[in-house]
Amino acid sequence: MKASYIAVCTLLVLLLAKPHVTMAVTCNPTQLSPCVSAITSASPPSTLCCSKIKEQKPCLCQYLKNPNLKKFVNSPNARKVANTCGTPFPKC
């Protein structure tokens, strides 16, 4: 009886303890290369561009702090592209 009680409790703990899988984002500004034409011209962002912006969103503040990237990432067109993709810039 005691062994079955322990087995049931263990099973409940295993079922209720859902593992939290988090995917780490590798911050790599070259991942945003599909967005170059949309950022530097008036062309709309591609689906690939939007998916890359969403993927790299946790990295945008880091990119804004980099003087070499800031002029591109902080441009009005870059913000427009991000908004068009449904991924507004975070407040850093």
Image (spheres, rainbow, N blue to C red):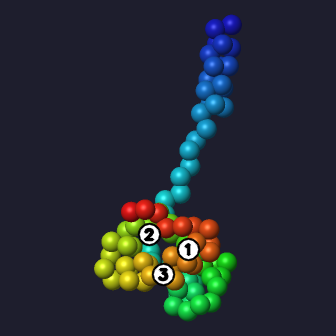
- Numbered tag placed on residue 3 in the rendering: none
Type of amino acid at the residue the image marks with label 1: Ala
Q: Is residue 51 visible?
A: no
The percent coordinates of residue 39 (x first, y second) are 53, 86
Q: Secondary structure under badge 2?
A: helix
Q: Secondary structure under badge 3?
A: helix
Tell me which label, 3 or 2, sits earlier in the chain. 2
Which quarter of the rendered picture does the C terminus lie within? Answer: bottom left
* Direction from residue 36 to residue 51 in the image, left or right: right
The percent coordinates of residue 79 (x first, y second) are 51, 76
Dot 2, crowdedness within 10 Å: few (<14), some or many (≥20)? Answer: many
The percent coordinates of residue 43 (x first, y second) are 62, 90
Residue drawn at 51 percent across, 91 percent down: 40
* Residues at marks 1 and 2 touching, judged by CB atoms closer than 8 Å: yes
* Residues at marks 3 and 2 touching, judged by CB atoms closer than 8 Å: no
Which quarter of the rendered picture does the N terminus lie within? Answer: top right
The percent coordinates of residue 18 (x first, y second) are 61, 38
Residue drawn at 68 percent across, 19 percent down: 8
Type of amino acid at the residue the image marks with label 3: Pro
Tell me which label, 1 or 2, sits earlier in the chain. 2
